[in-house]
Image (spheres, rainbow, N blue to C red):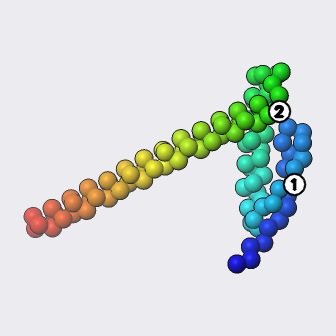
Amino acid sequence: MNKQNNTISVNVLNKTFAVNCPAGQAAELQQCSKQLNEELRKISKQNNTAEYDYIVTVAALNLIHAATNNSQVTQQINDLEQRLAQTLTQTEQMEFIEH
């Protein structure tokens, strides 16, 4: 299994990093780095004296928390879709029995 990786450059808080990226996912990785950079700048503005490690840690925690919440919402939607499908199936079965 040979997956092609590309190296792309991302800029985070005025530092450039070379990052390996699976082929075809460069745009997604660039978007992630943009989101990270926005979060880092927001935290940096709120706390001018914070050290780089602190800013990066808080940004990572904020983004992971947001992703976890999105994951939980997605799971809730999936659960509701399943219950709706079950209800529709039960309704169809009841209609079939009545006819």
The residue labelled by disc 1 is 18
Image position of 81 with respect to 92: above or below: above
Indicate the secondary structure of the residue bearing disc 1.
strand
Front-most of residues 89 and 74: 74
Helix or strand or loop: what does disc 2 sit on? helix
Residue kind at label 1, given as amino acid type: Ala
Residue 11 position by quadrant: top right
User: What residue type is disc 2 on?
Assistant: Tyr
> Residue most toward the left?
98
Q: Residues within 10 Å of mark 1 (few under 14, many from 20)?
A: few
Indicate left or right for 69 with 8 as reference. left
The nearer-to-camera label among 1 and 2 is 2
Q: Which residue is drawn at 87% across and 54% down?
A: 18
Q: Are marks 1 and 2 in contact (CB under 8 Å)?
A: no
Relative side of 86 to 78, left or right? left
Whichever of callouts 1 and 2 sits on the residue coming sooner in the sequence is 1
Specify the quadrant that holds the N terminus: bottom right
* Furthest-bottom residue in this view: 1
What residue is shown with label 2?
Answer: 52
The structure residue drawn at horizontal position 76% and vertical position 22%, both measured from the top left corner, is 46
Give the class, few, some or many, for how many residues have Cα within 10 Å of label 2's Cα (few <14, many ≥20): few
Q: Is residue 94 left or right of residue 55?
A: left
Whether residue 71 sits left or right of residue 44 in the image: it is left
Measured as percent of width and height from the top left, residue 53 is found at 79, 34
Q: Distance between the residues labelled 1 and 2?
A: 19 Å
93 up-or-down from 67: above or below: below
Q: Which residue is drawn at 78% across and 22% down?
A: 47
Q: Where is residue 70 in the image (x, y as percent from the top left)?
A: 54, 44
x, y percent for residue 54: 76, 31
